[in-house]
Image (cartoon, coloured by chain):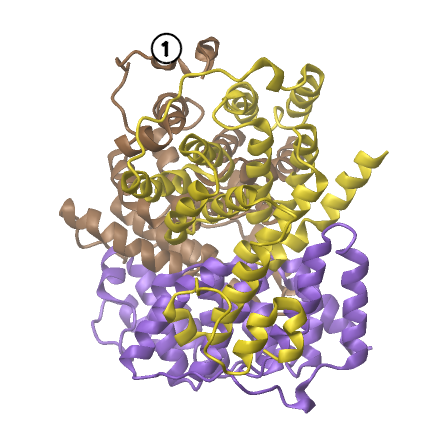
Chain colours: A brown, B purple, C yellow
Amino acid sequence: MKTFKGTLVGSALAVSACGAIAQAKERIAPPAVYKVAPGLGQYTDDLLFGEVWESPDLTPRDRSLVTVTTLISTGKFAQVGSHTRRALDNGVTPEEIGEMITQLAFYTGWPNAISSVFEVEKVFDERGIDGISDATELPAELAPDADAEADRRRSVDTSISPVLPRLSHYTNEALFSDLWLRPQLSPRDRSLVTIVSLVATGQAEQVRFHAQRGLDNGLSREEIAGAVTHIAFYAGWPKAVSSVSVLEDVFNIDDQ
Amino acid sequence: MKTFKGTLVGSALAVSACGAIAQAKERIAPPAVYKVAPGLGQYTDDLLFGEVWESPDLTPRDRSLVTVTTLISTGKFAQVGSHTRRALDNGVTPEEIGEMITQLAFYTGWPNAISSVFEVEKVFDERGIDGISDATELPAELAPDADAEADRRRSVDTSISPVLPRLSHYTNEALFSDLWLRPQLSPRDRSLVTIVSLVATGQAEQVRFHAQRGLDNGLSREEIAGAVTHIAFYAGWPKAVSSVSVLEDVFNIDDQ
Amino acid sequence: MKTFKGTLVGSALAVSACGAIAQAKERIAPPAVYKVAPGLGQYTDDLLFGEVWESPDLTPRDRSLVTVTTLISTGKFAQVGSHTRRALDNGVTPEEIGEMITQLAFYTGWPNAISSVFEVEKVFDERGIDGISDATELPAELAPDADAEADRRRSVDTSISPVLPRLSHYTNEALFSDLWLRPQLSPRDRSLVTIVSLVATGQAEQVRFHAQRGLDNGLSREEIAGAVTHIAFYAGWPKAVSSVSVLEDVFNIDDQ
């Protein structure tokens, strides 16, 4: 990396690019990264953890929600443990982590959820976390708007039912009349997790409905944009770029 | 989960949601699932294994074909072993499992196939399965229609050859004049495996040709719809939903 | 496999299909493959390694670049080690392997890159490879054309900035003003790696820009076509087929 790019990634990079050993911050990238791919080591410590995780466009808690969701959704189980620890440190509760996994079983498939459970269990054991509750109800003020829900159901009944009637049934009854009403994750966070899973797995077209729903559930455009930018680092640039035109539509629609 | 949703997932859920320990059925979800993500535990036992696997829209043997195919296609090797056992129990033969893997090497890449081989080998060893035959020929009555095959070849020659001539060559010679004619898997099952792999990996557009071919090979619309609904649970809702518009076209075309 | 298909995969296949034990070449497929999926064993040794890897449309070095890139991009870490060895044998340098990983962190996500580092480290240790340099500059004659870069930046500023301003910033500053200028991988190889990662992960639409850039960076159409054909075997047929219409456009545009 050339030193004139210090403007982007900070002076720590500029120094290290000149060969100095001193680092402005503790290294997060393991030694193997510097040994095999030194450029990746620098980008990890100076750009990803030095810049991106520090950016004000998203809170650390939200970055953790986005990161853990991306890892589970794309099946990167080797990183789920360390980012679960970081998520707990950033204020995500154990109940919320369990519920993110439950949500992602439906949105990215059971195997991702089950394999993640085993990684998260190790972290819970490490930290003495036990006895996750599963008993309360979603407060009435967080329940979805009845008109919006009627629209959603009509849309599923029109588009999916004629072709896949049982999928339509499970969509209406298991997803939207049960999973989405569980109180372990706020509707705002559930929307964030769902949008992220769709972007991270390349389902840009289905982002349309969920980005709109996310705005209705209290996410700001800036938070959605910050989340998608964060995904670029954890699932690759093309996944983030693919969602641009859909988000442009949703953000404009909301303007009018 | 609220008890009024017992209509969906049966009384077992209603009971457990009230805190009772008794379960109507044996739990399939491992204890770690209930510990980390209790909601996922209930959905696994009451909805996925209690409802979905029991639904009459697809035979248990077909559900196993769909499940194993989805796992291999999406690289979820941690679950391949247990579902290979279930597949053998549901009447899929060892030869058919080996041949599904061979088919999926071409449709989802060699690494998925090779990694799955090692998981399946453990199950075969456990059960004393050995000496898979690879010698017979596809019965003449199962060979593809000559006109349909000529159409297919013409389409490949027109669309792929000018851009990727060697891919066109391998498509015609290795896939359709060799792989698809192997007798270890019936054309009906081979079509099912192929359709499922396409849906599970998000290749909805290419479902068009293979869904039509599947109908020609003896799959019913109900079986294709049942398979895609089952995929929702193993590869995530969006993958199933993405195939709706293509299936709508194929199912209508067949009507006329 | 029927013997009349010996025209495709050579006489070795014809012989083995008749049940003879003798093989024209050493087997590369592990014994487990022949045991579980005998057809896959034959296709591996006779078609994939007997034909595809030997085809003159791509050099062995390029096949290794394509294979390792596909494995990293699709998260098939179990195969990264053996193909890193093969890549080193085919003339890819350790610096180039490290830099491919760095490039793929951005194009397919950090977790793929980090997990690959650990696999590659084992191979580097095995071979006593150490002390990868990260200090030189890209020779001026390899720097991108200033007009093309201005066009690229304008396009990002117009399309991405209004929706995802920070992603646009990172795209301009971290990717195109830093990563792409690193000398550890030639622009030609960097384009090849990028195109392959896009095709292998199903991002066909974004192949358009990078295929054109690849031609500008010295890739031939035949090399791009050879790479995409090779991907069919390592990420599945549908991924390769999905890129046909985009490549057709790019190759034609270049004609005029």
Image quadrant in which you'd find residue A64: top left
Side (left or right) of C153 relative to A7: right
User: Subunit of mark 1?
Assistant: A
Side (left or right) of C219 relative to A138: right
Residue A133 visible in rendering:
yes
Residue holding disc 1:
A18
Q: Position of residue B98 (x, y in %)?
A: 46, 76
Image quadrant in which you'd find residue C17: bottom right
Task: Please name whichever residue, A11 or C40, is drawn nearer the observer in this view of the structure.
Answer: C40
Q: Where is residue B48 in the image (x, y as percent from the top left)?
A: 40, 71
Q: Where is residue A42 in the image (x, y as percent from the top left)?
A: 37, 23
Quadrant of the rendering where the C terminus of chain C is positioned? top right
Task: Please name whichever residue, B41 or A37, is drawn nearer the observer in this view of the structure.
Answer: A37
User: Are there few (<14), some (14-19), or many (20+) residues within 10 Å of tag 1?
Assistant: few
What residue is drawn where x is 65% and y is 74%? C5
Image quadrant in which you'd find residue B138: bottom right
Residue A172 visible in rendering:
no
Task: Please name whichever residue, A185 or B118, is drawn nearer the observer in this view of the structure.
Answer: B118
The image shows residue A98, relative to residue B178, as above or below, that is above
Secondary-structure class at tag 1 = loop
The image shows residue B45, relative to residue B1, as above or below, that is below
The image shows residue B34, relative to residue B89, as above or below, that is above
User: Looking at numbered disc 1 in the image, what kind of residue is underneath it?
Assistant: Cys
Which residue reaches farthest right? C256
Number of numbered labels in the structure image: 1
Q: Where is residue C106 in the image (x, y as percent from the top left)?
A: 48, 33
Quadrant of the rendering where the N terminus of chain C is positioned? bottom right
Task: Please name whichever residue, B80 or C93, is drawn nearer the observer in this view of the structure.
Answer: C93
